[in-house]
Image (cartoon, grey):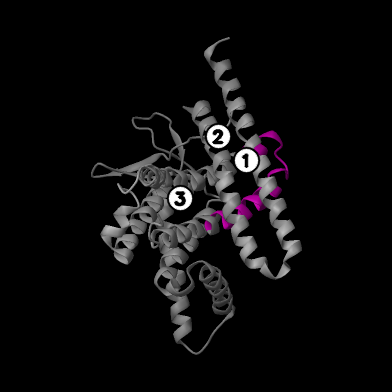
Amino acid sequence: MNTEAAKLIATALAIGLGVIGPGIGIGIVAGKAVEALGRNPDAEASIRATMILGIAFTEALAIFALVIALLIRFL
Amino acid sequence: MINISLKSDTIFWIYGFPVTNSLILSFIVLLLFLFLSMYYSYLLNSKKRNIFVYAMNFLLRALYNFFKSIFDTGINKFFVLVASFFFFILIHNEIGLFPGVGSILINVGSHGEKDLVPLLRGGTTDLNTTFALALITVSYAQYIGIKTIGIKEYSKKFLNFSNITSFFVGIMETVSEFSRIISYSFRLYGNIFAGEVVIAIMAFLFPVLLSFPFLLFEMFIGIIQALVFSMLSAVFYKLAMQKAHY
């Protein structure tokens, strides 16, 4: 296996494995937010704000994986 | 293969200072921002009002109520900064998707060589812009924390010798303060840059119509990311003003 092939595999693995965790995490966050919304529909504004905040933090991990993948691919 | 560059390209130099393509677009955005705000304040003071004023009023009121749920009473002090963050990042993200940005090429190779780079590049797809925004956020949070609760109380968050747990929590706080700069800048940069790469690759795979839904999705992502950045900095300011609770 030469360097170029190893790089391509590393890129795919970095982003492919990296988004598993955040994918599960965002699913849990959104699901729980909908659950809370069903229990208490009046608190929609604060639930939405907290949900976006939680999703942003979870998504940051996927973005880190993406940055690593881009670095491997293009540098 | 399509040409994707991680960093922005230098178009020309002014006295040894490199002027990159993202800097050119940043100045265009700055002028647009200035023009829009001056036009808005001019229309507010005059008698005749058009749809632009009402749309801006609606947007600003929604944004104000949104940040009020985070800041409560101190909203008037911070609203100027966080709303500026929101509009600046929003205009940057959306103008990066305009036709012509990234597609107009210019030859920068000297001595007859060919070196084609895009003339314009979205400001938030350059790490320098987002890093500057993150630095402003973090350093302003330090300033507002020291100003609100005093330097003695504020430094207790980071250096606390009262017991061993507080000491290690203080070290963690210090590290998280620095990692915030990286996470803020890379979140915005990664999202917007990845969006542009996805659009480019989709257009490359299937040239007709496939990149259109992704374009719409990226416009939505641009709004969400502008909101996320300003909201995270708002929460960060709110946290910086609170005393250490141990």
Task: Measuring from the top left, give residue A38's x and y in whole percent.
Answer: 76, 62
Query: Residue B123 got which mark?
Result: 3
Queried whether the magenta region covers residue B215, the answer comes back as yes
Q: Nearer the viewer, mark 1 or mark 3?
A: 1
Q: Residue at x 60, y 21 (%)?
A: A9
Per the rendered image, the range of residues in magenta is: B198-226
Q: Residue lying furthest top in this view? A: A1
Closer to the camera, B108 or B212? Answer: B212
Q: Nearer the viewer, mark 1 or mark 2?
A: 1
Residue B3 relative to residue B220: left or right: left
Amino acid type assigned to the residue bearing label 3 in the image: Gly
Q: Is residue B15 visible?
A: yes
Q: What secondary structure is the magenta-colored segment mainly?
A: helix
Q: How many numbered callouts?
A: 3
Q: Chain of mark 3?
A: B
Q: Are marks 1 and 2 in contact (CB under 8 Å)?
A: yes
Is label 3 in a helix, a strand or a loop? helix
Q: Which residue is mark 2?
A: A65
Task: Measuring from the top left, give residue B50's x and y in whole percent.
Answer: 57, 81
Task: Measuring from the top left, give residue B61's x and y in whole percent.
Answer: 55, 75
Q: Residue lying furthest bottom in this view? A: B47
Is label 2 in a helix, a strand or a loop? helix
Is label 1 in a helix, a strand or a loop? helix
Closer to the camera, B224 or B241? Answer: B241
Residue B203 placement: quadrant:
top right
Q: Nearer the viewer, mark 3 or mark 2?
A: 2
Amino acid type assigned to the residue bearing label 1 in the image: Pro
Q: Residue at x 62, y 50 (%)?
A: B218
Residues behind callouts 1 and 3 on a single chain: no
